[in-house]
Image (spheres, rainbow, N blue to C red):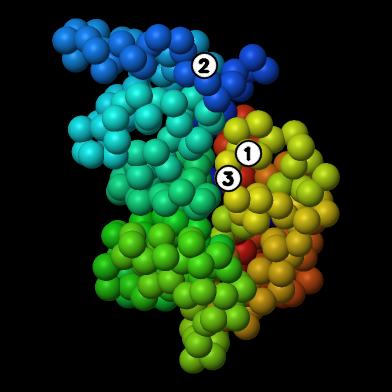
């Protein structure tokens, strides 16, 4: 294996996880929300109050989140009182505002759907570089369809197909213009694609079951467990995708999988066992393995 990431050496900085103090609860700051309703204070001062409440709640990107919440209010998502209360309860910002900026495009994220992470943008960029302009890509465990949508936006003449087991995620991906099929991993794919796919991508559930309790409280309380729980050692879905990849990939086609922790060595070994070659591990700025790439010879 070799360590690499983007061909030009560029990387995406990983944003810190929202801090979740033990003292934070779902209640809103006393009197503050009512202030928004009653006051004729200029917009700037109202924004300062939203920023202050978010900062007190432990959100380290309080200013950016305040702007998103206020923008959502202007777009008709609801009153700022309600939107702020939902955020302070730990609900994902993307569910409240309805979307997230990912890979240079706006991706709709419906409540109940896994929110694309900023560090996954690097994987999406790598996927773009691997897919021929008129090639065929398959995105498994697509969730909101973020990676598939980025691929389709950069390569409009390519065929990009996505799958997900969750019908809520499939519906969300379709809203993002993705050709999404409902089913388990590769099961919904047409047999006509055997040996023809240029690229398989996936952000699988890879958190070890035994470590789910270590996730931030808000993630455990709100985001779908099926999008997080990767089974023992977090390897269940990763190994399944590795096993099925050779039957779909053309000669020279690539598989690109996001992973975490110390999973790289085991997944790389599984790739070798099924005949995949040119295995590369992609690392972030902290030296942590974030993805594995391999090719069918």
Q: CA distance from mark 3 to mark 1?
A: 6 Å
Q: Position of residue 129 (x, y in %)?
A: 41, 58
The answer to which of marks 2 and 3 sits earlier in the sequence is 2
As helix, strand or loop, the secondary structure at mark 1 comes to helix
**Viewer-closest of 164 and 202:** 164
Q: Within 10 Å of the Cα at label 1, are there few (<14), some (14-19), or many (20+) other Cα atoms?
A: few
Which quadrant holds residue 217? top right
| Residue 133 shown left or right of residue 287 in the figure | left
| Residue 214 shown left or right of residue 9 in the figure | right
Mark 1 and mark 2 residues within 8 Å of each other at the beta carbon: no
Q: Within 10 Å of the Cα at label 3, are there few (<14), some (14-19), or many (20+) other Cα atoms?
A: some
Q: Position of residue 182 (x, y in %)?
A: 51, 74
Point out the image quarter for the N terminus: bottom right
Q: Which residue is mark 1?
A: 221
Q: Residue at x 43, y 21 (%)?
A: 61
As helix, strand or loop, the secondary structure at mark 3 comes to loop
Q: Which residue is mark 3?
A: 223
Q: Residue at x 59, y 21 (%)?
A: 25
**Viewer-closest of 129 and 161:** 161
Q: Which residue is mark 2?
A: 57
| Residue 96 shown left or right of residue 236 in the figure | left
Mark 2 and mark 3 residues within 8 Å of each other at the beta carbon: no
């Amino acid at each position: 294996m070799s360590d690499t990431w983007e061909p030009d050496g560029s990387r995406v900085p990983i944003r810190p996880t929202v801090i979740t103090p033990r003292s934070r609860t779902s209640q809103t700051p006393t009197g503050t929300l009512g202030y928004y309703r009653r006051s004729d204070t200029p917009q700037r001062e109202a924004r300062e109050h939203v920023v202050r409440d978010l900062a007190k709640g432990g959100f380290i990107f309080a200013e950016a989140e305040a702007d998103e919440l206020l923008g959502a209010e202007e777009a008709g998502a609801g009153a700022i009182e309600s939107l702020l209360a939902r955020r302070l309860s730990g609900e994902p910002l993307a569910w409240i505002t309805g979307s997230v900026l990912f890979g240079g495009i706006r991706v709709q994220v419906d409540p109940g759907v896994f929110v694309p992470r900023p560090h996954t943008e690097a994987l999406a960029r790598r996927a773009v570089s691997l897919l021929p302009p008129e090639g065929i890509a398959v995105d498994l465990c697509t969730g909101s369809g973020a990676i598939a949508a980025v691929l389709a936006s950069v390569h409009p003449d390519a065929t990009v197909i996505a799958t997900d087991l969750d019908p809520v995620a499939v519906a969300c991906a379709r809203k993002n213009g993705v050709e999404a099929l409902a089913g388990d991993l590769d099961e919904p794919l047409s047999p006509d694609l055997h040996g023809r796919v240029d690229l398989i991508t996936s952000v699988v559930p890879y958190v070890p079951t035994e470590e789910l309790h270590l996730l931030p409280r808000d993630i455990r309380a709100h985001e779908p467990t099926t999008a997080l729980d990767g089974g023992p050692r977090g390897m269940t879905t990763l190994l399944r995708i590795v096993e099925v990849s050779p039957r779909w990939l053309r000669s020279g086609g690539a598989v690109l999988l996001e992973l975490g922790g110390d999973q790289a060595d085991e997944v790389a070994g599984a790739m070798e066992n099924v005949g995949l070659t040119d295995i590369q591990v992609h690392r972030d700025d902290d030296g942590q393995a974030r993805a594995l790439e391999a090719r069918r010879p």
